[in-house]
Image (cartoon, rainbow, N blue to C red):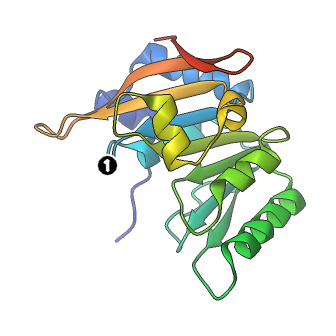
């Protein structure tokens, strides 16, 4: 039995995303904006990542950092970097991933909530040179503080993202949808989220 990969059309059909939200995210990706997707557990972060990858043109290379084979390449322009806990230190595994990314030299890097490497180091070292689609757990309504906690991202890293997509899950009905899309606004020592949609 195969794994079904969600498309943008699926998200529209299930009411996860509106046409207007989809257009904003498509433009952001094509303009190589860094996108951070946040939400609670089982809010649809991975399915949104899959759908967004469909929007990236075939001539642009995508490196996906995953753990234990969780992500399957479903397009020819996807290169998977699979990680797992092993005898090496967290720092050694992280350094190995960074070196692989630099060799691959992708147009986009996808990190979907993994704990086998040190994500803050990857973001700090590569966010200036590559376009990222990353996910983070966010349980409370304070998105910036949640990302700082779960991704261990400081203001400098957080300020390098251009767009934040907040997902919500209705636990009574099981429905998942984009609650809001924000632009990241950077001031000298503060990061703020400005609602776009």
Q: Is residue 77 in sight in this rendering?
A: no
**In the displayed structure, does residue 89 sit left or right of residue 178?**
right
User: Label 1, on which residue?
Assistant: 42
Residue 194 vs 79, above or below: the answer is above
Residue 89, above or below 94 = below
Residue 117 rendering spot, x and y as whole percentages: 64, 66
Query: For the view shown, which residue lies furthest in the left direction?
Result: 172
Residue drawn where x is 36% and y is 28% of the image: 141
Q: Residue furthest bottom?
A: 87
> Where 125 falls versus 146 (above or below)?
below
Residue 163 visible to an observer of this rendering = yes
Residue depicted at x 79% and y 67%: 95
Q: Quadrant of residue 177?
A: top left
Question: Callout 1: 10 Å neighbours few (<14), some, many (20+)?
Answer: some
Q: Percent from the top left, x then y, of residue 129?
A: 85, 41
Q: Residue at x 83, y 37 (%)?
A: 128
Judged left or right of residue 77, residue 178 is left
Counting from the top left corner in percent of width and height, residue 23 is at: 54, 18
Quarter-of-image position of residue 27: top right
Number of callouts in the render?
Answer: 1
Farthest residue to the front: give it: 189
Q: Is residue 97 left or right of residue 51?
A: right
| Residue 127: percent from left, percent from top | 77, 41
Q: Residue at x 62, y 41 (%)?
A: 133
**Rendered-image quadrant of the N terminus:** bottom left
């Amino acid at each position: 039995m195969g794994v079904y990969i969600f498309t943008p059309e699926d998200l529209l059909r299930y009411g996860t995303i509106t046409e207007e939200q989809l257009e904003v995210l498509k433009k952001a990706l094509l303009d190589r904006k860094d996108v951070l997707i946040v939400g609670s557990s089982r809010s649809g972060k991975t399915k949104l990542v899959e759908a967004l990858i469909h929007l990236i043109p075939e001539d642009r290379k995508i490196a996906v950092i995953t753990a234990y084979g969780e992500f399957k390449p479903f397009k020819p322009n996807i290169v998977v970097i699979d990680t797992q806990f092993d005898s090496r230190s967290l720092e050694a595994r992280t350094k190995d991933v960074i070196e692989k990314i630099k060799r691959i030299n992708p147009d986009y890097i996808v990190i979907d909530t993994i704990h086998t490497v040190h994500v803050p180091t990857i973001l700090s070292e590569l966010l200036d040179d590559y376009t990222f689609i990353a996910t983070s757990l966010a349980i409370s309504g304070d998105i910036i503080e949640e990302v700082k906690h779960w991704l261990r991202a400081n203001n400098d890293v957080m300020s390098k993202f251009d767009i934040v997509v907040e997902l919500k899950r209705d636990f009574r009905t099981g429905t998942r949808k984009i609650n809001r899309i924000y632009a990241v606004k950077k001031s000298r020592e503060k990061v703020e989220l400005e609602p776009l949609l």
